[in-house]
Amino acid sequence: MTEKSEPTHSTDDLLDFLYRLGQAYLACGEQTAHVELQIRRIATSYGARRARVVAFPTAIFITLDGGEGERVTLAEGPLRKLRLDQMADVYNLGTEVQGGKIPISEASARLTAITRSPARFGVLGTLLGHIVLSIGVAMILNPVPEGILFCAVLGAMVGVLKLVMNEKSLFSVTLPVLAAAMVSAMVFLAVRYGLPVDPIHVLIPPLVTFLPGAMLTFGMIELAYGDMVSGSSRLITGFVQLFLIAFGLAAGAMLAGFQLDGDPILTPDVTGIAILAWFPWIGALVFGVGVFLHFSAPKNALPWMLLVLILAFTAQRLTAGVFGSQFSGFFGTLVATPLGYLIHLKFKGPPPMVTFLPSFWLLVPGALSLLSVKRMLSNTTEGMEGLVSTVFVFASIAIGTLLGASLYKFLSERFGSWQLQIGRVGRSPERKKK
């Protein structure tokens, strides 16, 4: 029997690393219950067997007992969101440290390097990615040549705005409002001066990355598992962001001279091209490539991202005609969620968050939440109906995500050796192997 080696780290060092890793998980948009579970497991691996963790989207509490009394820390939530490559590195690091084999000093240095790493494709690649994903969404919604070209121009403008303002935390909060106002003003001015584009379809693509689809979806899942504080805060934050986007759109329209009592420029005479049966799927692929570039996805992620996108998009399109667009997102995430876990755990692909987050941005789109802009700008009652429809969309996607994860858990327990931990189920102690 080998003698157990003494730890090479102090309790304070371990506590510092754990709260920073918790912040990184929260910056990935992870459920708070899963963050708590991961932090407790890692603390146990490094000898702190009575760790207590409470995580919220904006704060994390950790208590450790290293034998010399309890150490407690309260840390603020993440200051900014992470890119897809950073998410993958954070999850991979979390998996490695669960074995307790990496010195805490090395793990802490790696975490610092991850959070400070530059975008894989640089400034130009990030900007090009935003243009490409805007084109992809435009190809799906309404493939009019003039509209696609105009979306590319608007996507470039919003991409530049994000690059300039995202580095300045003071202005990053107002970024969605300013971007929506800029896009709305440009669109309505273009239509007023004779450019043959449909505002309802051109407004959406440049703003799709601002839609808080994942935030609202995970908020509903957390509410379903009893995390009332975390779930409610995510939902409120997400809906506030939607209202801010809608406010920006209304402000831009008024700056362009559009009147709220119903202006004829809102419904111009636009003749679209004949939509080929496979054209929307090409748009989904283009969108996936744009997300890969703009959010700096890891090297091996593109094929898996495109696979999940295409299958989720196919499920949504095939069911929309039967159940309606409001509920078709349920079937898209029902496919995307278990597929993301399967790719990561059975085929050694990127973490699930990397593969199915792009699906949220494609399924949730503003397609419904922003397509009701016409009604919101012209009639208060119809605007409220559009808001209710948006709630149904996010609810259906949240339920699809929840059932998709449960489906994978059931199949893995029945046909595989790995068991998926989701929601509050992950809080219970692991079963001993017989």
Image: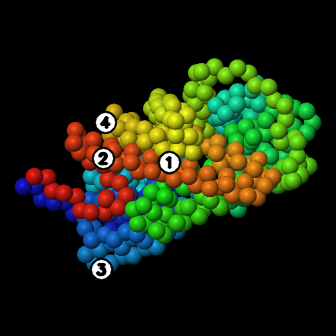
Mark pair 4, 3: CA separation: 42 Å
**Numbered circle sitting on residue 346:** 4
**Numbered circle sitting on residue 397:** 1
Q: Nearer the viewer, mark 1 or mark 4?
A: 1
N-terminal label among 2 and 3: 3
Q: In this orientation, which residue lies closer to the viewer: 295 or 352? A: 352
Residue at image position (81%, 29%) is: 270
Residue at image position (70%, 27%) is: 143
Q: In this orientation, which residue lies closer to the viewer: 67 or 385? A: 385
Q: What amino acid is labelled 2 in the image?
A: Lys
N-terminal label among 3 and 1: 3
**Dot 1, crowdedness within 10 Å: few (<14), some or many (≥20)?**
many
Task: Return the residue at label 2.
Answer: 409
Regarding mark 4 in the picture, which secondary structure is present there?
helix
Q: Nearer the viewer, mark 1 or mark 2?
A: 1
Query: Is any atom of residue 164 visible in this view?
Result: no
Displayed quadrant of residue 149:
top right
N-terminal label among 1 and 4: 4
Q: What amino acid is labelled 3 in the image?
A: Gly
Residue at image position (85%, 54%) is: 260
**Dot 4, crowdedness within 10 Å: few (<14), some or many (≥20)?**
few
Left or right, 170 with respect to 2, comes to: right
Q: In this orientation, which residue lies closer to the viewer: 143 or 298? A: 143
How many marks do you count on the picture?
Answer: 4
**Numbered circle sitting on residue 69:** 3
